[in-house]
Image: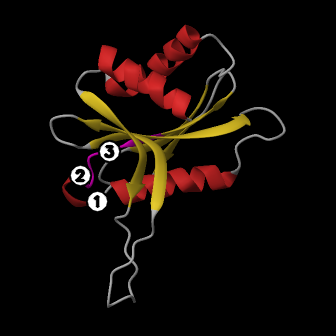
Amino acid sequence: EQYIFILLNELLNEKYKNYYLKYQYTINSITKVNNKPNNEFLKMDADFLILEKNTERPIVVIDTKYVDIYKKNKLQNYAYYQMISYLTGLNTGVYRNKGISAILLAHGNEGNTYKIPNEYCDMYVMTKGIDILEDERIIKDSLDKILYEILV
């Protein structure tokens, strides 16, 4: 996870200068209703969040999963529900209905894209495979291809 963070951070600093990366970003916009003395939040920690530098608007939430997308331990439904929760938690306040994407990074060659129904904006959960056993440059190029689809 930290290795991917370093590579993503380098990539944003080199190529996507209008964005910055947060590590272990806490999403705490979903509050507990019946807790009057001190409002507790449903705390969710995303591995990475890419934000727009000028507006602080969340653009992409990324979570790493160490499974092979197409093997026996493929991504389970809970991983997708987790990403939908992140999207819901980030789609609040002034950034409501601005659209945000979620990426599940896992080991593998391909992936899928799922559109989350919303009448005001498009939100997507994407599974993207990268080979974390490859050379650093190849991993970084794979991450670049993934980000290019969203940031350009």
Identity of the residue drawn at 22% across and 26% down:
18
* Mark sitting on residue 95: 2
Crowding around mark 3 (Cα neighbors within 10 Å: few <14, some 14 to 19, many 20+) is some
| In contact (CB < 8 Å): disc 1 and disc 3 | no
Crowding around mark 2 (Cα neighbors within 10 Å: few <14, some 14 to 19, many 20+) is some
Q: Is residue 127 above or below residue 12?
A: below
The stretch of residues the image draws in magenta is 96-102
Taking depth in this image into account, of 33 and 80 the one nearest to the observer is 33
Q: Is residue 67 above or below residue 130?
A: below
- Identify the secondary structure beneath mark 1: loop
> On the rendered structure, is 126 left or right of 152?
right
Rounded to the nearest angstrom, the CA distance separating label 3 from label 2 is 8 Å
> On the rendered structure, is 111 left or right of 43?
right
Q: Label 3 sits on what residue type?
A: Gly
* Mark sitting on residue 92: 1
- Identify the secondary structure beneath mark 2: helix
Measured from the top left, where is residue 82 in percent x and y?
55, 55
Tell me the residue that label 3 is attached to: 99
Rounded to the nearest angstrom, the CA distance separating label 1 from label 2 is 6 Å
- Identify the secondary structure beneath mark 3: loop
Query: Disc 1 or disc 3, which is closer to the eye?
Result: 1
> Which callout, 1 or 3, points at the residue further toward the start of the chain?
1
